[in-house]
Amino acid sequence: MQQPAAGAEQPAPRILSTAEIQQKLEENAMLIKAINERQSVGNLKDCIKYQQKLQENLMMLAALADAQAVPQNPQ
């Protein structure tokens, strides 16, 4: 996957409903639990795919939060 050039604008994330956001948060909780369980038994190969999905979800949620943030007026 290619990274955008520094300073390149990212497309605006799709706006998610509250239910969709909650579903992503619940999925993230399950991914964290799965990562923890696999790490505890030494199954690091499976951890990688769960960590990649978790990272993808977190980046998507962060981009969504940034897009919806209300700009603060400097004082």
Image (cartoon, rainbow, N blue to C red):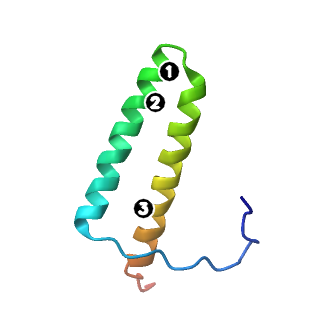
Q: Secondary structure at mark 3?
A: helix
Q: Which comes before the other along the chain, label 2 or label 3?
A: 2
Question: At 70% from the left edge and 78% from the top edge, which residue is drawn?
Answer: 8
- Residue pictured at 54% horizontal, 19% vertical: 43
Q: Residues within 10 Å of mark 2 (few under 14, many from 20)?
A: many
Q: Residue furthest left?
A: 19
| Cα separation between marks 2 and 1 | 6 Å
Amino acid type, label 1? Gln
Q: Give the residue displayed 54% in from the left and 29% down from the top.
A: 46
| Disc assigned to residue 35 | 2
In the rendered image, the vertical position of residue 17 relative to residue 39, given as above or below: below
| Mark earlier in primary sequence (3, 1) | 1
Give the spatial CA distance, label 2 vs label 3. Answer: 19 Å
Mark 1 and mark 2 in contact (Cβ < 8 Å)?
yes
Q: Is residue 49 left or right of residue 68?
A: right
Secondary structure of the residue carrying tag 1 is helix
Q: Amino acid at mark 3?
A: Leu
In the displayed structure, 43 sits above or below 59; it is: above
* Residue marked by disc 1: 39
Q: Give how far apart the Cα atoms at labels 3 and 1 are.
A: 25 Å
Image location of residue 23, percent across then percent down: 28, 54
In what element is the residue under mark 2?
Answer: helix
**17 and 7: which one is in front?**
17
Q: Nearer the viewer, mark 2 or mark 3?
A: 2
Query: In this figure, which residue is indicated by the disc labeled 3?
Result: 61
What amino acid is at disc 2? Ile
Residue 32 quadrant: top left
Whole-percent x, y for residue 29 in the image: 33, 41
Callout 1 crowding tier (Cα within 10 Å): few <14, some 14–19, many ≥20? some
